[in-house]
């Protein structure tokens, strides 16, 4: 592996203009394809095989005139204080408003609240349901404007009017202020870590190019593959974070090799052969974790995983080819000015390549920290482990759900409409359940009506049901739908229990009549997806962690190191879940983060964060332990290997973690609850994993294990391939004059001080 990548690095260095031109061409093609491609559609979450999804599919088949998952709006009217919406003037204003919408472009139907009984008991609130022939993303701006103009018409008449439903849902677009702040912080960290504007700009430029290509490809493939804006944002988030990190690691190693006296071309080859090997295996763990999301069975989650995995794969390719090509363009300008001057002075004296002398003085922070952990491994391990355990405690109260209008800001009309409906009709009105009665196996209109009447009676008898509407029959008279309104809010535990209670109660009617009775609706779908996610968690962890442990077993040729890595990941992800519960359920620091509404954590988040964080955690494990393994292979004692690993990689890993945290935190400012939750969860997980698990727990455990940390049974030693991630083959093939032993001259420090 190291030799192959070494050749790639030198080839890219020599053919720098060709490599740069190819990547520039790829960027232009991706952007052109994105510009010409039609906009993708935002799809509702679906879970094939669940009862609620079967019901939606049946409704589309039996009621083709209506789109069961099409756009819908609710105009909610409230009369002025002391008045009723049934008063003549107010009633006329409501009907005039609805009349301006009826028959409009893309409008399928509107309901009259006075005919349908959609007026609250106190007569102060009424609502009308407007259904559309297209999904929310396909609604034209003129259609949305007509809806808002109608609401303003009623407001001019003195009524309070809010708009709920999916009709005004907007696609989340990246590129806000907070994301730019995250990139700016990353740029500052790069400058401080590398001590050179050229080196920092190189890492940022390559990452942005990879992200731009990934974003362009996702946009171009949005329609053919059904990719949503969330897929694009995840690809942007991950591609930017890992792209900067991978470029940083290879650039840092290039600087070290130049400091050891290597010529730039040789340094580029060795940097790609060593740090590039770590990048390949780190990227592979992220790729496995993201692709593994497909085992859950949720199409949207599978697409998110594939989009993120593609962005990571592009970041690896850019790091292995474009980064060394830019080394060829900039050469020693990537080094800090002082080191360029020292090297120039030596060359002007007619001497060959020599290592750049480093500043004498006390060891860097990373080295001092590693030695501290070696002196007190038990204390460090106990404090770090117990600290993460304490942070993870709130995760025991984790509640899952899918965000609806209740999770939006109180400044939005959707949230105000939700609150008005709750006030006028009860909290469960915003999450009605749809019961579908299929009697196609029977014959005759009388059978359908009789069975449906039994279902209505049964559902009304279930404790927790506030009301059951009149059934509606299909044209073929073999399917009926009825609406049951719970007494409790959509995301409450009582509503979840109610869905199961209704399904249990109607099973008796199914047995007596032979009909198929299904409970669906957005609330039921959310419950089914949450339960499916919980059921898929163990298989997912088994597949992903199992494959990654095998990969790390090959990389480090150790049994205990991969197991330790997996256990450390569980600690960091548990602490991240604790933060999610504290922020999004309990409201801790919610105002500081701009989160206006607390509630259940989105049901997709646990498994999505597990997949992403596991891959990123293995990134730091690979980068940190590669240098330790390299020292161990060259004969260093366990303690010396730990100190050497931190001296070479500790500061760079810390800088990479800060960059990744900044990028993820930059997405917290977006309005989408999904992206907000993802940003907080990923930033917290990286913080805990990089600075607590990898920087404290890992060296403490390795110190306690000693030589046993690198133990590998003989049978595995014979069977496992030797991928040579440490670059031992490069050490043998490079002439002695081209390198200086690490024990003779310390490597070029990263930043101002060695560490």
Image (cartoon, rainbow, N blue to C red):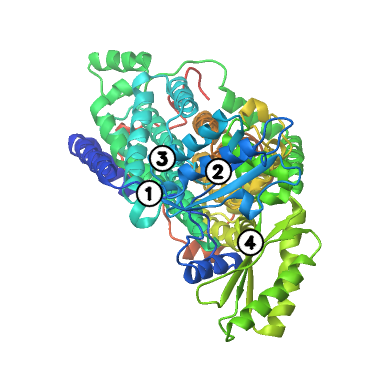
Looking at the rendered image, the disc whose residue lies closer to the viewer, 3 or 2, is 2
Mark 2 and mark 4 in contact (Cβ < 8 Å)? no
Dot 1: within a 10 Å radius of its alpha carbon, few (fewer than 14), some, or many (20 or more) residues?
many
Q: What residue is shown with label 3?
A: 275
Looking at the rendered image, the disc whose residue lies closer to the viewer, 4 or 2, is 2
Q: What residue is shown with label 2?
A: 95
Q: Is residue 629 visible?
A: no
Q: What residue is shown with label 1?
A: 40
Q: What residue is shown with label 4?
A: 528
- Determine whether, in the image, residue 162 is placed left or right of residue 382: left
Q: Which mark sits nearer the N-terminus, 3 or 4?
A: 3
Above or below, 401 against 751 in this view is below
Dot 3: within a 10 Å radius of its alpha carbon, few (fewer than 14), some, or many (20 or more) residues?
many
Quadrant in which residue 530 is drawn: bottom right
* Helix, strand or loop status at disc 3: helix
Percent x, y of residue 599: 69, 42
* Helix, strand or loop status at disc 4: helix
């Amino acid at each position: 592996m190291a030799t192959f990548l070494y050749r790639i690095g030198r080839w890219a260095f020599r053919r720098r203009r060709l490599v740069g031109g190819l990547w520039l061409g790829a960027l232009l093609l991706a952007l052109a394809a994105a510009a010409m491609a039609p906009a993708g559609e935002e799809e509702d979450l679906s879970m094939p095989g669940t009862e609620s999804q079967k019901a939606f599919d049946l409704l589309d088949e039996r009621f083709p005139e209506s789109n069961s998952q099409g756009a819908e709006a609710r105009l909610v009217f409230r009369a002025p204080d002391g008045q009723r919406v049934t008063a003549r003037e107010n009633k006329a204003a409501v009907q005039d408003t609805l009349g301006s919408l009826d028959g409009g472009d893309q409008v399928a139907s509107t309901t009259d609240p006075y005919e349908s009984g959609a007026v609250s008991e106190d007569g102060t609130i009424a609502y009308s349901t407007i259904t559309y022939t297209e999904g929310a993303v396909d609604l034209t701006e003129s259609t949305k404007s007509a809806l808002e103009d109608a609401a303003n018409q009623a407001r001019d008449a003195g009524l309070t009017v809010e708009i709920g439903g999916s009709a005004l849902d907007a696609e989340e677009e990246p590129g806000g202020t907070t994301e730019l702040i995250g990139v700016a912080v990353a740029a500052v960290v790069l400058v401080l870590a590398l001590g050179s504007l050229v080196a920092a700009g190189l890492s940022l430029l390559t990452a942005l190019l990879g992200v731009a290509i990934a974003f362009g490809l996702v946009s171009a493939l949005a329609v053919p593959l059904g990719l949503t804006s969330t897929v694009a944002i995840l690809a942007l988030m991950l591609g930017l974070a890992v792209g900067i990190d991978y470029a940083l690691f290879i650039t840092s190693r290039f600087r070290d090799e130049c400091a050891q006296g290597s010529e730039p071309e040789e340094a580029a080859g060795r940097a790609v052969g060593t740090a590039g090997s770590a990048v390949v295996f780190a990227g592979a763990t992220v790729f496995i974790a993201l692709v593994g999301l497909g085992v859950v069975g949720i199409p949207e989650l599978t697409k998110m995983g594939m989009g993120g995995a593609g962005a990571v794969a592009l970041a690896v390719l850019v790091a292995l080819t474009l980064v060394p090509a830019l080394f060829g363009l900039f050469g020693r300008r990537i080094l800090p000015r002082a080191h360029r001057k020292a090297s120039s002075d030596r060359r002007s004296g007619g001497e060959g390549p020599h290592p750049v002398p480093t500043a004498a003085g006390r060891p860097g922070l990373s080295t001092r920290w590693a030695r501290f952990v070696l002196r007190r491994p038990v204390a460090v391990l106990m404090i770090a482990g117990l600290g993460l355990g304490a942070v993870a405690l709130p995760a025991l109260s984790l509640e899952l759900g899918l965000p609806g209008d209740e999770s939006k800001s109180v400044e939005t009309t959707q949230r105000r409409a939700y609150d008005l409906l709750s006030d006028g009709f009860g909290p469960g009105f915003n999450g009605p359940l749809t019961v579908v009665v299929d009697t196609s196996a029977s014959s005759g209109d009388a059978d359908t009506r009789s069975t449906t009447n039994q279902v209505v009676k049964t559902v009304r008898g279930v404790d927790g049901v506030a009301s059951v509407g009149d059934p509606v029959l299909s044209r073929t008279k073999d399917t009926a739908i009825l609406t049951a309104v719970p007494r409790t809010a959509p995301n409450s535990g009582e509503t979840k229990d109610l869905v199961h209670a209704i399904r249990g109660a109607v099973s008796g009617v199914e047995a007596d009549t032979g009909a198929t009775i299904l409970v669906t609706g957005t609330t039921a779908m959310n419950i089914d997806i949450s339960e499916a996610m919980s059921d898929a968690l163990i298989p997912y962890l088994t597949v992903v962690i199992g494959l990654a442990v095998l990969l790390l077993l090959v990389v480090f040729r150790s049994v205990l190191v991969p197991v330790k890595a997996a256990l450390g990941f569980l600690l960091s992800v548990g602490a991240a879940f604790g933060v999610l519960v504290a922020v999004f359920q309990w409201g801790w620091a919610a105002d500081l983060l701009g989160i206006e509404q607390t509630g259940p954590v989105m049901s997709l988040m646990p498994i999505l964060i597990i997949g992403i964080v596991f891959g990123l955690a293995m990134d730091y494990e690979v980068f940190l332990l590669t240098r330790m393994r390299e020292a161990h292979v060259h004969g260093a004692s366990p303690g010396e290997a730990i100190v050497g690993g931190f001296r070479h990689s500790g500061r760079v890993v810390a800088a990479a973690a800060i960059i990744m945290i900044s990028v993820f935190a930059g997405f917290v400012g977006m309005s989408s609850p999904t992206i907000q939750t993802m940003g907080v969860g990923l930033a917290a997980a990286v913080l805990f994993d990089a600075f607590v698990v990898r920087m404290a727990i890992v060296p403490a455990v390795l110190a306690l294990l000693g030589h046993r940390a690198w133990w590998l049974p003989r049978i595995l030693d014979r069977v496992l391939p030797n991928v040579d991630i440490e670059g031992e083959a490069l050490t043998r093939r490079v002439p002695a004059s081209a390198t200086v032993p690490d024990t003779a001259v310390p490597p070029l420090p990263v930043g101002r001080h060695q560490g």
